Image (cartoon, helix red, strand yellow):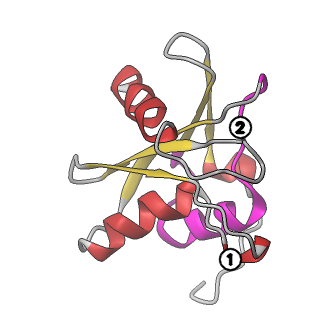
Amino acid sequence: MISELIEKALEAREKAYAPYSKFKVGVAVLTAGGKIYTGCNVENASYPVGICAERVAMSKAVADGETEFTVIAIVGSGENYCMPCGMCRQFMAEFCKEDFKIIVAKSVDDYKIMKMGELLPYTFDLCK
Protein backbone atom coordinates (compact mmCIF):
# COMPACT_ATOMS: atom_id res chain seq x y z
CA MET A 1 0.00 0.00 0.00
CA ILE A 2 2.89 2.39 0.73
CA SER A 3 4.25 2.09 -2.81
CA GLU A 4 0.80 2.66 -4.32
CA LEU A 5 0.23 5.80 -2.25
CA ILE A 6 3.64 7.21 -3.12
CA GLU A 7 3.10 6.48 -6.82
CA LYS A 8 -0.28 8.25 -6.75
CA ALA A 9 1.29 11.21 -4.93
CA LEU A 10 4.02 11.40 -7.58
CA GLU A 11 1.34 11.42 -10.30
CA ALA A 12 -0.60 14.14 -8.48
CA ARG A 13 2.55 16.25 -8.16
CA GLU A 14 2.73 16.47 -11.96
CA LYS A 15 -0.62 18.31 -11.95
CA ALA A 16 0.51 20.97 -9.47
CA TYR A 17 0.08 24.60 -10.42
CA ALA A 18 3.23 26.26 -9.09
CA PRO A 19 4.27 29.03 -11.52
CA TYR A 20 5.66 31.25 -8.74
CA SER A 21 7.62 28.96 -6.43
CA LYS A 22 8.25 26.19 -8.99
CA PHE A 23 7.89 23.85 -5.98
CA LYS A 24 5.38 21.15 -6.86
CA VAL A 25 3.79 18.94 -4.21
CA GLY A 26 1.61 15.85 -4.63
CA VAL A 27 -0.38 13.93 -2.06
CA ALA A 28 -2.35 10.71 -1.81
CA VAL A 29 -4.49 10.11 1.28
CA LEU A 30 -6.14 6.82 2.24
CA THR A 31 -9.51 6.85 3.96
CA ALA A 32 -10.56 4.38 6.64
CA GLY A 33 -12.92 2.93 4.01
CA GLY A 34 -10.05 2.20 1.63
CA LYS A 35 -10.52 5.02 -0.90
CA ILE A 36 -7.55 7.03 -2.13
CA TYR A 37 -7.83 10.76 -2.83
CA THR A 38 -5.09 12.80 -4.44
CA GLY A 39 -4.21 16.48 -4.42
CA CYS A 40 -1.59 18.92 -5.58
CA ASN A 41 -0.61 22.42 -4.55
CA VAL A 42 -2.33 25.28 -6.37
CA GLU A 43 -0.60 28.65 -6.17
CA ASN A 44 -2.08 32.09 -6.76
CA ALA A 45 -0.53 35.47 -7.57
CA SER A 46 -2.03 36.67 -4.29
CA TYR A 47 0.17 34.38 -2.17
CA PRO A 48 -2.18 33.55 0.73
CA VAL A 49 -4.93 32.47 -1.66
CA GLY A 50 -3.05 29.34 -2.76
CA ILE A 51 -3.74 25.94 -1.23
CA CYS A 52 -1.48 23.09 -0.23
CA ALA A 53 -1.75 19.59 -1.70
CA GLU A 54 -2.67 18.03 1.67
CA ARG A 55 -5.72 20.25 2.09
CA VAL A 56 -6.77 19.73 -1.53
CA ALA A 57 -6.79 15.93 -1.19
CA MET A 58 -8.48 15.86 2.19
CA SER A 59 -11.05 18.46 1.17
CA LYS A 60 -11.97 16.37 -1.88
CA ALA A 61 -12.50 13.41 0.42
CA VAL A 62 -14.56 15.40 2.92
CA ALA A 63 -16.70 16.70 0.04
CA ASP A 64 -17.41 13.04 -0.77
CA GLY A 65 -18.42 12.36 2.83
CA GLU A 66 -15.12 10.80 3.97
CA THR A 67 -13.84 12.13 7.29
CA GLU A 68 -11.72 9.26 8.61
CA PHE A 69 -8.19 8.84 7.32
CA THR A 70 -5.41 6.33 8.03
CA VAL A 71 -2.34 7.43 6.05
CA ILE A 72 -1.11 10.17 3.73
CA ALA A 73 1.85 10.20 1.32
CA ILE A 74 3.49 13.53 0.51
CA VAL A 75 6.08 14.18 -2.21
CA GLY A 76 7.69 17.49 -3.03
CA SER A 77 10.02 18.56 -5.80
CA GLY A 78 13.06 19.40 -3.70
CA GLU A 79 15.98 17.30 -2.55
CA ASN A 80 14.66 16.98 1.01
CA TYR A 81 11.56 15.26 2.34
CA CYS A 82 8.56 17.56 2.02
CA MET A 83 6.99 17.99 5.43
CA PRO A 84 3.46 19.34 5.77
CA CYS A 85 3.31 23.00 6.78
CA GLY A 86 1.83 24.03 10.12
CA MET A 87 -1.52 24.92 8.60
CA CYS A 88 -1.79 21.49 6.97
CA ARG A 89 -0.76 19.75 10.18
CA GLN A 90 -3.58 21.47 12.04
CA PHE A 91 -5.99 20.71 9.16
CA MET A 92 -5.06 17.01 9.31
CA ALA A 93 -5.45 17.03 13.10
CA GLU A 94 -9.11 17.94 12.64
CA PHE A 95 -9.77 14.53 11.07
CA CYS A 96 -6.88 12.30 12.16
CA LYS A 97 -5.88 10.61 15.37
CA GLU A 98 -2.38 10.76 16.84
CA ASP A 99 -1.51 7.41 15.20
CA PHE A 100 -2.39 8.69 11.69
CA LYS A 101 0.61 7.86 9.50
CA ILE A 102 2.38 10.49 7.42
CA ILE A 103 4.71 9.24 4.70
CA VAL A 104 7.14 11.80 3.33
CA ALA A 105 8.83 10.46 0.23
CA LYS A 106 11.45 11.34 -2.34
CA SER A 107 10.62 8.20 -4.34
CA VAL A 108 8.91 4.83 -3.95
CA ASP A 109 12.12 3.50 -2.40
CA ASP A 110 13.15 6.52 -0.32
CA TYR A 111 10.66 7.56 2.36
CA LYS A 112 10.07 8.10 6.06
CA ILE A 113 6.95 7.34 8.09
CA MET A 114 5.88 9.43 11.06
CA LYS A 115 2.74 9.66 13.14
CA MET A 116 0.52 12.69 13.53
CA GLY A 117 1.36 12.92 17.23
CA GLU A 118 5.05 13.33 16.36
CA LEU A 119 4.50 16.18 13.91
CA LEU A 120 1.90 18.07 15.91
CA PRO A 121 1.88 16.88 19.53
CA TYR A 122 -0.29 19.70 20.89
CA THR A 123 -3.10 20.27 18.44
CA PHE A 124 -5.64 23.02 18.85
CA ASP A 125 -8.93 21.22 19.50
CA LEU A 126 -12.17 22.82 20.62
CA CYS A 127 -13.86 19.42 21.06
CA LYS A 128 -11.53 17.93 23.69
Q: Which residues are magenta?
A: 79-101
Q: CA distance from mark 2 to mark 1?
A: 20 Å
From this view, report whether residue 61 is shown above or below residue 99.
below
Quarter of the view holding residue 93: bottom right
Q: Is residue 83 magenta?
A: yes
Query: Can you give x and y, in whole percent of width and height, for residue 15 in the image?
Result: 46, 44
Quick one: 100 or 22, which is closer to the camera?
Answer: 22
Whether the magenta-drawn stretch holds residue 80 is answered as yes
Give amino acid for label 2. Cys
Q: Is residue 127 above or below residue 25?
A: below
The nearer-to-camera label among 2 and 1 is 1
Q: Amino acid at mark 1?
A: Val
Q: Is any part of residue 67 visible from this angle?
A: no
The image shows residue 22, relative to residue 125, as above or below, that is above
- Give the x, y percent position of residue 48: 76, 75
| Secondary-structure class at tag 2 | loop
Toward the top, the furthest residue is: 109
Answer with left or right where residue 86 lies relative to residue 15: right
Whether residue 80 sits left or right of residue 72 in the image: it is right
Figure label count: 2
Label 1 sits on a secondary structure element that is helix
Circle 2/circle 1 CB separation < 8 Å: no
Q: Quadrant of residue 64?
A: bottom left
Residue in the picture at 71% in, 42% down = 23
Residue 83 visible in the shown view:
yes
Label drawn at residue 49: 1
Residue in the image at 65% along x and 62% along y: 43
Taking the spot 72% from the left edge, 46% from the top edge, the residue there is: 118
Q: Which residue is mark 2?
A: 82
Q: Nearer the viewer, residue 35 or 13?
A: 13
